Each structure stands twice: as C-alpha cells, then as structure tokens.
C-alpha cells in the first residue's frame, strides 16, 4: 500500500473515532484531501485509495492538476483566495469554491460559469475569530452575502467555510468551531438551504467534527509536510 493510502486510512479512522465518540454518523462528515503543492501523481495515488474530492489553494496550480487528471472522475474544490483576474479559470474548471468572501467575486463566478457545467457549489468564507489580515467576511456580514450569493443563477450556495487561528488550547479551538456552527444554524434559520459546514484541518479535525463540521479539509496528514 502506498504511504498516501496508509495516511488516508489513518485520517478516515480519526474521523470514524471522533464520530463514534460524539454520536455522529461518519457519512455526515466528508473528507476533502488538500493536495496543494503536491503533484498529480500524489492525487492519483489518493484516488487509487478511494479518495475523490480534492482541494487546491493556488488557482493556476489547481487548474494544471485538473487538466492533467481529466481521465479520473474527481471533484475539485477551490479553497484559496481568488483574485478577480482568476475567476474565469475557477468558474471553468472547479466544482466547488469554499473561499467566496465578496459579492463581486461571486457575481463574476456566476457570470463566467460555462452553461454546459452544473452550477458552481459555493461556501462563504467567514473570518470567524476576527483575525486581522485574514480572508473571509466577518460573522455579522455573512447573512447579507449568503443571501446575495443564493440569488445568483449559476451558483448553488452550500454553506460556510472557516479557518480559525491555530490555538494552543483545544478548548478554545472548540469554542471557535462552536461559534461557526451557531452561525451556520442561524443562516439556515433565515431560510437558506445549507448542508455544508467546511471546517477542520489536520490539527483540529476532531474539534471541528465535535462541533458539527460536515466537511474537513486535510492536507498534511494525507500528503505529508509542505
Ligand atoms: C492548506 C489548507 C488546508 C489543509 O491544511 P493541513 O493543515 O495541511 O491539513 C485546509 N484548508 C485550507 C483553506 C488550506 O489552505
């Protein structure tokens, strides 16, 4: 078995264990394998081990991999910042975008999504712990952006994505994830039809699943250190 396959199984076991300990159905937690900085061959190995959903941060690098792997039935998620001059590439090649934090980006993605493709699946990125210099809308701005995105024709709003600071204290990490979960529930209570809470990475996937994450984005634990 390849090292990547072994790592994948270990991550799946982590998800299973935390779901079991917290009375959650593991089917309710999707694993997104974050392949940024690793080559197409690493993605092939992960696919051979059963992984189908991959996340990329850097648009051009992601598109190069998507084109090199067109023979495989993969689902590609853009999880990095998107400059205006990159929206066309994203709209043409990715299936999901987790990092929408401005209406202008969403409008461009909707206008540029090729008509023959399914709607682009969208998460609003929320700066849940309010760090300076961080991408994402502040929690108080999430509802207005989510409602505007939900109204765009070629996008399908699925939920929110967060990247909390790496805190030393796991209880603090959990508390921040709980805030994201509460915001997600609040948006749903406003009539938005959301099924995705994208939160949790290699270091904090347990805390994220404990607090209701439906999609964890894991890079290092699968592909190794960058
Ligand atoms: C790199 C990255 C990840 C994966 O982080 P790891 O700590 O390697 O698991 C997840 N989400 C985003 C947005 C990232 O940029």
Image: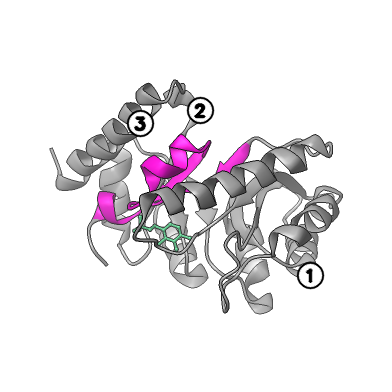
Which quadrant does ligand 1 occupy?
bottom left
- Residue name at image x 77 percent, y 61 percent: 141
Q: Is residue 161 among what the camera can see?
A: yes
Question: Looking at the picture, does residue 91 appear above or below residue 188?
Answer: below
Residue identified by numbered label 3: 18
Q: CA distance from mark 3 to mark 1?
A: 38 Å
Residue identified by numbered label 2: 28
Q: Secondary structure at mark 3?
A: helix
Foreground label between 1 and 2? 2
Q: Which quadrant, please, contains the N terminus? A: top left
Q: CA distance from mark 1 to mark 2?
A: 31 Å
Quarter holding residue 118:
top right
Label 1: how many Cα within 10 Å (few below 14, some 14–19, many 20+) = few
Q: Is residue 184 left or right of residue 153?
A: left
Quarter holding residue 32:
top left
Q: Position of residue 36 (x, y in %)?
A: 38, 63
Q: Is residue 191 magenta?
A: no
Q: CA distance from mark 2 to mark 3?
A: 12 Å
- Residue name at image x 50 percent, y 41 percent: 215
Q: Secondary structure at mark 1?
A: helix
The magenta region covers 196-223
Q: Is residue 117 among what the camera can see?
A: no
Label at residue 104: 1
Depth order, front residue of 175/68: 175
Foreground label between 3 and 1? 3
Depth order, front residue of 179/134: 179
């Amino acid at each position: 078995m390849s090292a990547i396959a072994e790592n994948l199984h270990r991550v799946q076991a982590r998800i299973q264990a935390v779901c079991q300990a917290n009375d959650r159905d593991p089917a309710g937690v999707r694993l997104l394998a974050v392949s940024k900085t690793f080559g197409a061959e690493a993605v092939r190995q992960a696919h051979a081990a059963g992984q189908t959903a991959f996340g990329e941060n850097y648009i051009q690098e992601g598109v190069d991999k998507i084109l090199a792997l067109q023979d495989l039935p993969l689902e590609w998620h853009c999880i990095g910042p998107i400059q205006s001059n990159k929206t066309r590439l994203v709209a043409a090649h990715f299936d999901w975008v987790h990092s929408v934090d401005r209406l202008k980006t969403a409008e461009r993605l909707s206008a540029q999504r090729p008509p023959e493709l399914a709607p682009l699946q969208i998460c609003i990125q929320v700066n849940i712990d309010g760090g300076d210099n961080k991408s994402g809308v502040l929690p108080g701005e999430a509802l207005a952006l989510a409602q505007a995105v939900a109204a765009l024709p070629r996008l399908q709003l699925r939920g929110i994505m967060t990247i909390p600071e790496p805190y030393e204290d796991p209880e603090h990490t959990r508390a921040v994830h709980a805030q994201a979960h509460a915001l997600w529930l609040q948006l749903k209570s406003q009539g938005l039809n959301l099924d995705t809470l994208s939160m949790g990475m290699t270091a904090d996937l347990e805390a994220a699943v404990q607090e209701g994450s439906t999609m964890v984005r894991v890079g290092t634990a699968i592909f190794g250190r960058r």
